[in-house]
Image (spheres, coloured by chain):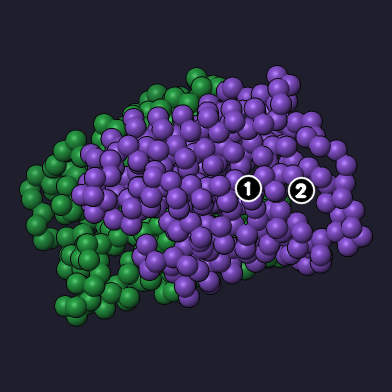
Amino acid sequence: MIGMSRQFMLSSILFVFVLLVLVPLAVNMSGRQDLFYTLTSVALLAIASGGVWLTFYIGRINIGQGAFSLLGGYVSAILMVHYGVSFWLALPIAGIACSIVSVLIGLPILRLRGVYFAMTSLVLTQVMQLLALALPITNGAKGMVSIPLPGALTLFGVTLIPDFATIGNLKQAFYFLAVVLMIACYAGLYRLTRSRLGAICVSLQQNEELSASIGINIAAMRVLAYAVSSFLGGIGGAIFVAISQSIYPSSFTVTDSVNFMLNCFLGGLGYVFGPMLGTLVLYFGWDLLYRTADYQLLIFSSILIALMLVLPNGLLSLRLKALAKGGHYG
Amino acid sequence: MEQALANGVYLGAQYALIALGLTLVFALMNVLNFAHGQMFVLGGFVTYTVYGQLKLPYWIALVASALTLAIVGALFEKFLFRTVLKRSSRDESTMLLAAGTAFFLDAVILLIFGEKQRGVPKIVNGILDLDVVIMPYDRLLIGALAIVMIVAFILFMQFSKPGRAMRALAQDRTAAQLMGVEVERYSMIGFALGAMLAGLAGGLLVAITGVNSGIGGPISIKAFMMVMIGGAGVISGAILGGFILGMVEALLLSVLHSYGDITYLVIFASLMVFLSIRPQGLVGKPWG
């Protein structure tokens, strides 16, 4: 791979090893199976946040990822419940459906910039939620429940993934599913930032007119980036549906869209792995503060504000160079 | 239909007042104040406390709301936004800060005032009945007050020295600074003024619909929409956007109510279509 130092290789292998071997071991030893569920949520939210990060990468503030998570969730839920499609097929279809919708929506709205795009994407979340409430196929506010667990995945008669209903440790199974997808997602994003495409994305972020003037089809590029971003949002939403076995119009709201964006900010917009760290810190930070009950939101928001004052460019601006320096912003 | 129009004008005046504060802060500092709705709610609760609980006259309550929010706004600008704007390498960082302050205000409001819906006694009794239009007197009074405040704000921005300084800042920060405008001072005044407008709007609306701690977020989103319709950072745009949204909401609610709860779906969807055709809003500068 291009520009991949030995040090980076080592640390990423170590990272994958920790996620796939050490963390499950530690959780199993501690006997707190609920931690699997928490970590799975973090992984899923990190996937969706990774998508938001990509839109930041082309210079758009995206507060609309909740819309695509909701859409992906509903697409996979409807496919599984009404059409009996297997989860393993419904998952990519949900992602692709989100990409297609995002291309249609993105063509007009990606012409907007700055707060204009940000606000439009925020409105998009609202539209999607209201659509889920209004359309007959989504079952309105009652939502869709008792969605089947992922079945077995077989290829040429070989069972690659066993039926989730027969797995003893369901929480751990979902953990592996989400973490593997998260690793794939961030590996892809990292590769993207190191490719020619990534350089083009940065040029869009810095000066669209200039990159258009040297012959880059900026309209196509930003729609492409947005489609990938929405694909990730849809995937995140679809797995969420498989885990909770239900989806409601309120499953992903404006708050979630804002949180996806905050994850990116918190981790640092200049770093590919920023959203992953941001999601982890934000999610666990919120959970840890649960004990403070009434003061949870107060303490949480104060810390958020303080972090902004001390580290306005994100947590990773603390210069964890080896692991984190993925992007190349100035 | 006439009734819907009358409701629209009343609603529009409230909305315009909310949107004005948001657009002012945006024009001056390029900050999208996520906490605007929460400031509105805080203003509502201050009025509720002073007028509803302490039984002081309504105008004192309004002044208290305005002062409280002006102070909050000034402090936010001086200690938070100014610092982050200086240190951050990207403008968008202020969005995280603004979201943080929104959460913070939400938490403070929840802790101090609780989560119950609060209302105040009617400020005036009686109903104006014109056959085609029926309007309670208190709504008329509140609507009129809102319009008076909007006019006062426009006059202030047009003719006073701070108003001129702030308009200069909004046009070109560097040029304004070169002309001897104290940028930091007027940024703070502008932020305080924007917050104050939100507080006043909250104080006005609590007299009609009451207030509860959960409405901050939705109010912010509505305010964003109004600003988008008119064009961000333009005063006339905010007023236009406010009245248009108020009008559309009132009309659609009366026309569409037989089709179920799709009013807001229609509004949001048409806003997206509108923005993709005219991104800068009705009167905004392109890429303002």
- Quadrant of the snapshot with the N terminus of chain A: bottom left
Give the number of the disc on residue B148.
1
Q: Which of the 4 image quadrants contains residue A229?
A: bottom left
Q: Residue at point 19% right, 78% down?
A: A213
Q: Are marks 1 and 2 in contact (CB under 8 Å)?
A: no
Tell me which chain appears purple.
B
Is A245 placed left or right of B138 in the picture?
left
Q: Which of the 4 image quadrants contains residue A308?
A: top left
Is B27 placed left or right of B11 in the picture?
left
**The disc labelled 2 sits on which kind of residue?**
Leu
Under tag 1, what secondary structure?
helix
User: In the rendered image of this protein, does residue A29 appear above or below residue A317?
Assistant: above
Q: Residue at point 43% right, 56% down?
A: B233
Q: Chain of mark 1?
A: B
The residue that label 2 is drawn on is B140
Are marks 1 and 2 in one subunit?
yes
Q: Nearer the viewer, residue A137 or A110?
A: A110
Under tag 2, what secondary structure?
helix
Tell me which chain appears green.
A
